[in-house]
Amino acid sequence: MVFRRLFGRTSSRAGSGTTHKEGSIAVHNAENTHSLADVHDSIKSAVVTIELPDGGGSGFAVRTDGILATNRHVIAGHTAARVSFVDGNDTIARVVQSFRDVDLAFLLTEEPLRQVLPLHNGEQLRVGQDVFAVGNPSSLGHTLTKGTISALNRLKDGVRYIQTDTAINPGNSGGPLCDLDGQVIGMATWGQKYDSQGTPLEGLNFALPASIIKEKLALLPKRSELLKTQYCPVCGGINAEGKYCGTCGVELALYIEETTKNSKRQVFLKTCPVCQTKAQRGQSHCEHCGASLIPQTHED
């Protein structure tokens, strides 16, 4: 279920001069009974923890046919990940596309999703507006932090980010930054911890605007088409099944022969480190979820 309208109907309080529109929260109204806890309860099931053998991060559902969004740097070098929900359920999701220029990636879950988070169009955001982030900081599990929008359009590497003082720590990357209507205004992406002189800084965190996520998501093929594609972890492109990436030309290595040049033998894991599927058949990627099965290379 797409979370669009959270509370109530349009109403006016006599003598107050204040009108509350449907789906909005009057955060300064002392009589307002819809707290941040209420908003969080309404969106938490669409936020996921992303688990990888060498780390992880956060993500959130953006399409009911199984699409999750996260940062590219969270899944860098991987083709699949285990994702877990706040209710304790987990599943395997494979990476289907990523964008290096905006540090964004999309994953596809094994089954469709029951709830997704709406993406804000970026209009009418204001400095000083209350926001909150949900994610998996330092692998502690599902965590909420709150703050404000500190600035808009902070330019870095050609991307205009939302600046916030909301706490964003390692593990939060890829998680949603939401307004008090429960709409995603951005994706927690990076924080500046030190200045150029090495002096520690606080409260300088940045989110990729939801409008960029929305733009990239609109170009993503539907589920039935994605199930027939292959992800390139080098350039992030979508490919029909084949030996080489059609965008960057790298060998996609669905199958690698055991003996390679220079008399080196490739060692394959017998159990997938992501989905735990056993009895793998000597290939470079898991036949179930697509994760890499190559731990290292040994000399004969």
Image: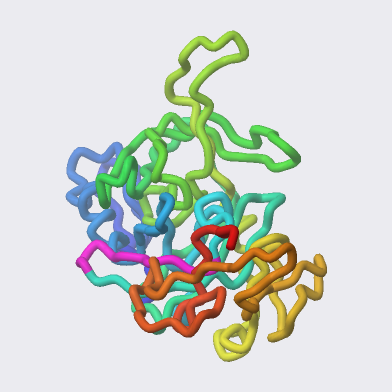
Q: Is residue 60 above or below residue 122?
A: below
User: Which of the pair 19/252 is nearer the observer?
Assistant: 252
Tell me: 4 left or right of 124. left
Which image quadrant is residue 31 in?
Answer: top left
Q: Is residue 251 located in the magenta-colored stretch of the structure?
A: no
User: Which of the pair 165/225 is nearer the observer?
Assistant: 225
User: Which of the pair 165/195 is nearer the observer?
Assistant: 195
Tell me if I can see residue 259 in this picture: yes
Tell me if I can see residue 4 in this picture: no
Q: Is residue 185 above or below residue 156?
A: below
Residue drawn 60% across the image and 56% down it:
104
- Colouring scheme applied when the structure was drawn: rainbow
Tell me which segment is drawn in magenta: 79-88
Tell me: 244 left or right of 42. right
Q: Is residue 83 located in the magenta-colored stretch of the structure?
A: yes
Q: Chief secondary structure of the magenta span?
A: strand
Q: Position of residue 267 (x, y in %)?
A: 52, 68
Residue drawn 40% across the image and 36% down it:
169
Q: Position of residue 97 (x, y in %)?
A: 63, 68
Tell me: 137 left or right of 14. right
Residue drawn 69% across the image and 60% down it:
234
Count of numbered tags: 0
User: Which of the pair 163/112 is nearer the observer?
Assistant: 112
Residue drawn 20% across the image and 66% down it:
87
Q: Which quadrant holds the N terminus?
A: bottom left
Q: Position of residue 18 (x, y in %)?
A: 34, 45
